[in-house]
Image (cartoon, grey):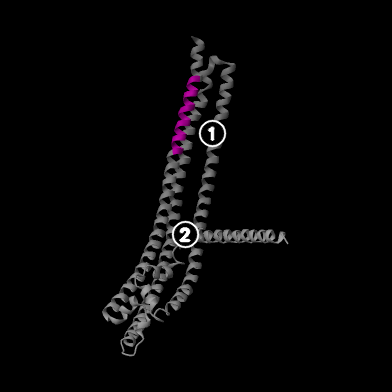
Amino acid sequence: MAWLPLQDEVNEMKEREAQAKVDAENAAKMKAEEDKMRAANLDGIETLADDMTKQDPEWEQFCMVPNLTEGWNAVRDAFHAQKEPFKVSMLKQHEKKEQEYAEWKSVVDGFLAEKDGQAKDLITVYEKMKKKAISQIQHNPGEADMHVLQPKVRLTTLKDELLELEEECVEVLQELLKEFDRNYSELVETNKASYNEYFAQVRDQQNNYIGTLTQTALNMYEKYNQESSDIDSIPEEARSLLLDKDALMNALQASHEAHTVQIDSLEDRLVNTELKRANDLVAHNYAWAAKRNRDRISEIINYVERNMIELEELAGEEEMGDI
């Protein structure tokens, strides 16, 4: 029937759309997982075993020799067994760091909001006094100088009160900053120790593996250097290793060093990133507090100066009236 080919095309299109949807969902999940690992400073942990072999200049040759690298699967399994509890622990530590910052920020915001409220109350009292003086001047401009006297005195004391509040804010903020620095640094030091412990375990696995690999390779060297060996069945590139003991030992050493470099590099990067992020956050907090304090003092001084000028101008209206 003529409609069958068309129906097949429709079905294929639906299948492609369904597969595309699944692929997009999987890609989104993978990206979310990568983002989570990066935020927790764990990126590179999942791929460490693969990265070690990818960066190993001898690995391809080793894989050409039958059964030589079969022990690597056990190492990968050991990596996975060590990685999972480490990852869970570090993700919890990341949550603790986020919680520590959130709680600190909540305390800071609450304290500053309270002090801002006190400052606004003081300013409101003055603004009402100024508004009353303006009204009095409008009804009796000849006594403007007398009407602004009380607001002027109040403005002077208001400046002292606002600066006193700000001085209290500066002192309390400094203590809160120090407390956060201390608590956050403790979490970071715990993380640093966890990185060191985990990578020490990884190095132990690598050291055990290279020992086993070396012994297996030497046994194969003995085997394939016998007259009855089937060394011709091995690709020529790998065969040259098994015919030259010095070349074989050099290749094993190069392989081990390549794996060790990957381990060391990842540990250094993660530890340095952990410390840098903490230092950057603490520095950001101190910089924010310093800017906030400077800005607030400038606001107070500008407010007082602006209002004093306004009161002087109001008092000057009496003189203009006399003239």
Locate residue 276 relative to residue 316 in the image: left or right.
Answer: left
Q: Which residue is mark 1?
A: 123
Q: Secondary structure at mark 2?
A: helix
Q: Position of residue 51 (x, y in %)?
A: 41, 67
Judging depth in this view, the residue of 292 and 4 nearest the camera is 4
Task: Give residue 38's mark.
Answer: 2
Identified at 54% across, 60% down, the residue is 27
Q: Residues within 10 Å of mark 1 (few under 14, many from 20)?
A: some
In the displayed structure image, the side of residue 227 where residue 299 appears, left or right: right
Amino acid at circle 2: Arg
Is residue 204 visible in this depiction of the protein?
Answer: no
Where are the magenta residues, as a range? Answer: 295-313
Q: At which x and y percent is residue 16? A: 61, 60
Point 34% across, 68% down: residue:
261
Amino acid type indicated by mark 1: Ile
Please, what secondary structure does the residue beneath circle 1 have? helix
Let me know if residue 40 is in the magenta part: no
Q: Position of residue 211 (x, y in %)?
A: 35, 80
**Mark 1 vs 2, N-terminal side:** 2
Specify the quadrant of the image occupied by residue 5.
Answer: bottom right
8 to 110, vertically: above or below:
below
